[in-house]
Amino acid sequence: MKNYTITVNGNVYDVVVEEGTSTGAAAPAVPKAAPKAAPKAAAKAAGAGSIRVEAGAAGKVYKIEASVGQALKAGDAVVIVEAMKMEIPVVAPQDGTVASIDVAVGDAVEAGALLATLN
């Protein structure tokens, strides 16, 4: 058995995976995961500003273009998301100052996921 910690949409799960041989028949999987509390730092950082910058498509965070405290104009890139081998810039919806960056490079994100906030 192997133990993994997996984060899905901000929820952290400890998962135990049993190794075995496949018989070819699909057996229903019984999850052995229980959610545990999200880290306090992430909870405080999430939603620090009033203007939300959200992913337009599901993908992986490729690069973070802005930093907390940086002034941005509408249309400036905040985060680059990689989806289907394309780099998609996620831009500031309006002028503002970056209040929080809520993702890290390599994070998997769903469409509509909070990436950053602005004030």
Image (cartoon, grey):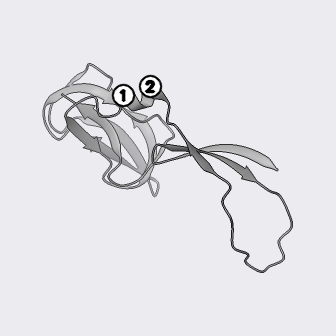
The residue wearing badge 2 is 41
The residue wearing badge 1 is 45
Compared across the picture, whether 25 is left or right of 75 comes to right
Q: Is residue 65 above or below residue 19?
A: above
Q: Residue at x 68, y 49 (%)?
A: 15
For the residues bearing labels 2 and 1, Cβ distance under 8 angstroms = yes
Residue 66's disc number: none
Residue 34 horizontal/vertical position (percent): 61, 49
Specify the amino acid type for callout 2.
Ala
Task: Single out the residue that lies furthest toward the top.
Answer: 69
Query: Is disc 2 placed on a helix, strand or loop?
Result: helix
Specify the amino acid type for callout 1.
Ala
Circle 2 packing at 10 Å, graded few (<14), some (14-19), many (20+), is: few
Whether residue 75 is visible here, answered yes or no, is yes
Circle 1 packing at 10 Å, graded few (<14), some (14-19), many (20+), is: some
Compared across the picture, whether 32 is left or right of 53 comes to right
Q: Residue at x 86, y 67 (%)?
A: 21
Compared across the picture, whether 105 is left or right of 23 comes to left
Residue 49 horizontal/vertical position (percent): 23, 30
Whether residue 91 is visible here, answered yes or no, is no
Q: Is residue 11 above or below residue 32?
A: above
Query: Is disc 1 placed on a helix, strand or loop?
Result: helix
Q: Residue at x 45, y 48 (%)?
A: 9
